[in-house]
């Protein structure tokens, strides 16, 4: 099995072969002296050249992964090149229409634009209140507010689409 | 002692209080909003009662509902924790009317010492130094300039009606006073419709140092020493420690005496904190009194060996403080970090949501005061404090090393937490040298994040783990573990099927 792992801005190729109960692992074409055990659900003990790492994995709603090491936190996007219906195509789309989603569950307390408005990159579109804090959601690009789904007073969940900027 | 104590709070502090009650053998009654049915404090309490919808003004801030629960559950004391109703004198008043003991100061002492202006007036009468300046609007600019000269520059001109830095001018020297006064006044007029400004001495790089006091109902008031809370983000404390690295026995005595004087003058009882700013010349200035238990009380507990919550309960029950505590000195060093559900990489956005996994640190010198558990969903309705991690050791160095070690062990997945912020602070040379002040962290966050520590091996291990996770957890359908919610049609169909069964 071969996977492409996009992590910390780099694409790594991880190839996995199953031998008895162990994995034989190639990272970017080089065989690793490694031992990997899932010691608890979503918790991996990884021995790399004798160095012990503990990795805790949390799957995210969009299919990507959050990985916690002792020192850092990473996002990873794993694709199987054979399947190749990767979400990488999504990145191309991002050039055009931008979907503005709620970064956290909360309540929309103010809408700062109306449909059809021209907006600049970084301009505030709306304000979401969560945990007593008001957070301005800004436009990721300059363009036009094509569609506005958000209404003042509306409760939203993380990932809910609030607006389109074209 | 009390028959049963109602805890009028939630989260980690409710858990902290009910742990103390459990140790004292006093049954507890918790209260909870609709968002908190599954909260840790509800699970751990002896009894728990609903008090309404998620918004706190309809639940945790409703004195009538809390008093109803207290009567219904036959509680004879109420502990308010911190936040919510803790500094609302209407609660001790309602308690007094109902014949229930409020674990805290009297309503009168709360009003006298808790309100900013009243507290400052009392401080002056008790000869506790306050930040020099005028409290009243400046009528005569020339007179104000003379005052500025006598206090020494720099000085701050602040809008009386102000806030948010508007109508505020820093005047560095005498020649700039007239222009500064004019600018501050016109800005204040534009922003608030009121041109009045007042004058205050500007403290350069002040440190926030506060004194923990205890006062019993028999007239004994003691100081349990200081905590330094200079590491703040937008005036919110982020790291607290005791003792303060700049403290000397002589300064501790002077600050402690001032705090005790103020508490006596205000007729204060129970636990309280007197906050001061300390400037580069080790001169201290009164800031305000917190008439309650504080978030950072554990650092004082670790260096004094006392349990402040149990002492609050004992004082409220009329017990006397021992004479020997008038000369208590701290042992070792303690430091606390506040873990929040927020994203330090993204403007400190709050990050409520479900905690997928939690692993807490342990081992020598580590204490965790937590309010959450694995599998719980952090609600969006309240303060995002998840838990407090406290380390103590023989020296400040050992304490910092333990805190760093504990942060490496601590893992919470599923939501964002501010642990990366602490990793950064605890490695900053200024912090290690204790060269900190109340603006230090805000200034640090303005600077670009230095290239993070080398974790390239960790990144390799993470990449491998990610691939194996994918291969073993239905790897070919990445979103399978978070499949879209089931169709309502399907659910309806199944419901009808079930109804057809005999």
Image: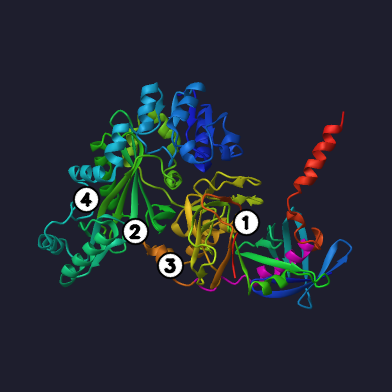
Q: Which residue is mark 2?
A: B164
User: N-terminal of the two: label 3 or label 4?
Assistant: 4
Q: Is residue B344 left or right of residue B460?
A: left
Q: CA distance from mark 3 to mark 1?
A: 34 Å
Q: Nearer the viewer, mark 3 or mark 1?
A: 1
Q: Is residue B450 magenta?
A: yes
Dot 1, how many residues are within 10 Å of its Cα: few (below 14), some (14-19), or many (20+)? Answer: some
The residue that disc 1 covers is: A160
Which stretch did the figure color magenta? B449-470
Mark 4 vs mark 1, foreground winner is 1
Marks 4 and 1, how far apart in space?
Answer: 53 Å
Ranked by sequence position, the earlier of labels 3 and 2 is 2
B473 horizontally vs B372: left or right? right
Q: From the image, tell me which residue sits under label 4.
A: B129
Residue at the disc numbered 3: B444
Asked if B270 appears above or below B71 in the picture, the reply is: below
Is residue B333 visible in the rendered structure shown here? yes
In this view, the residue farthest toward the front is: A116
Q: Decide: few, some or many residues near mark 2? Use Cα within 10 Å; few <14, some 14-19, many ≥20.
A: few
Q: Is residue B40 magenta?
A: no
The residue mark sitting in front, 2 or 4, is 2
Residue B411, quarter of picture = bottom right
Query: Residue at (39%, 64%) from the top-left corner?
Result: B440
Q: Which mark is residue B381?
A: none
């Amino acid at each position: 099995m071969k996977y492409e792992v996009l992590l910390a801005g780099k694409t790594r190729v991880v190839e996995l072969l199953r031998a008895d109960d162990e994995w034989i692992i190639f990272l970017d074409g080089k065989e690793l002296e490694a031992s990997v055990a899932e010691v608890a659900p979503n918790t991996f003990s990884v021995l790399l050249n004798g160095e012990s790492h503990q990795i805790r994995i949390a799957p995210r709603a969009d299919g990507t992964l959050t990985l916690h090491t002792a020192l850092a936190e990473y996002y990873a996007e794993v694709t199987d090149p054979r399947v190749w219906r990767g979400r990488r195509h999504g990145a191309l789309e991002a050039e055009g229409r931008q979907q503005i989603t709620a970064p956290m569950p909360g309540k929309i307390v103010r809408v700062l634009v109306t449909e059809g408005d021209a907006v600049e990159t970084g301009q505030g579109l709306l304000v979401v209140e969560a945990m007593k804090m008001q957070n301005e959601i800004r436009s990721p690009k300059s363009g036009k507010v094509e569609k506005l789904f958000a209404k003042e007073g509306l409760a939203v969940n993380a990932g809910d689409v609030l607006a389109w900027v074209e | 002692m009390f028959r049963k104590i109602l805890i009028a709070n939630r989260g980690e502090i409710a858990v902290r209080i009910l742990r103390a009650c459990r140790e004292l053998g006093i049954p507890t009654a918790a209260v909870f909003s609709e968002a908190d049915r599954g909260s840790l404090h509800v699970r751990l309490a002896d009894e728990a009662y609903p008090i309404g919808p998620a918004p706190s003004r309809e639940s945790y801030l409703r004195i009538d509902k809390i008093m109803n629960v207290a009567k219904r559950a036959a509680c004879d004391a109420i502990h308010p924790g911190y936040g919510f109703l803790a500094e609302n004198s209407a609660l001790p008043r309602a308690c007094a009317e109902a014949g229930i003991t409020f674990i805290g100061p009297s309503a009168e002492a709360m009003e006298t010492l808790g309100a900013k202006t009243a507290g400052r007036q009392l401080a002056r009468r008790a000869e506790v130094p306050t930040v020099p300046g005028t409290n009243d609007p400046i009528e005569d600019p020339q007179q104000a300039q003379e005052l500025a000269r006598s206090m020494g520059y720099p000085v701050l001109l602040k809008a009386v009606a102000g806030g948010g830095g508007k109508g505020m001018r820093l005047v560095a020297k005498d020649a700039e006073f007239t222009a500064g006064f004019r600018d501050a006044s016109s800005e204040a007029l534009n922003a608030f419709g009121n041109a009045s400004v007042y004058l205050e001495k500007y403290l350069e790089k002040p440190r926030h140092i506060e004194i923990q006091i205890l006062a019993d109902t028999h007239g004994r008031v003691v100081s349990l020493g200081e905590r330094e809370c200079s590491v703040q983000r937008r005036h919110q404390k982020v790291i607290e420690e005791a003792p303060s690295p700049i403290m000397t026995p002589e300064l501790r005595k002077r600050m402690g005496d001032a705090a005790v004087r103020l508490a006596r003058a205000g007729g204060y009882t129970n636990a309280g904190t007197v906050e001061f700013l300390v400037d580069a010349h080790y001169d201290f200035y009164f800031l305000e009194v917190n008439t309650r238990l504080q978030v950072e009380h554990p650092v004082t507990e670790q260096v004094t060996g006392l349990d402040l919550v149990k002492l609050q309960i004992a004082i409220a029950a009329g017990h006397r403080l021992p004479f020997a505590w008038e000369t208590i000195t701290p042992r070792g060093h303690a430091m606390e970090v506040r873990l929040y559900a927020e994203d330090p990489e993204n403007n400190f956005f709050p990050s409520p949501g479900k905690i997928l996994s939690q692993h807490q640190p342990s081992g020598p010198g580590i204490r965790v005061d937590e309010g959450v558990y694995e599998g719980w969903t952090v609600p969006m309705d309240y303060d995002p404090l998840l838990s407090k991690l406290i380390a103590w050791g023989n020296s400040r160095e050992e304490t910092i090393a333990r805190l760093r070690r504990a942060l490496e062990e601590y893992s919470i997945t599923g939501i964002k937490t501010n642990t990366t912020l602490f990793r950064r602070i605890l490695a900053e040379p200024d912090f290690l040298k204790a060269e900190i002040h109340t603006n230090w962290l805000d200034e640090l966050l303005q600077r670009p994040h230095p290239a993070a520590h080398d974790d390239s091996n960790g990144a390799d291990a993470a990449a491998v783990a990610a691939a194996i996770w994918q291969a073993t957890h239905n790897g070919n359908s990445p979103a399978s573990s978070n499949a879209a919610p089931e169709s309502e049609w399907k659910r309806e169909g199944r419901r009808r099927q079930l109804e057809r069964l005999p």
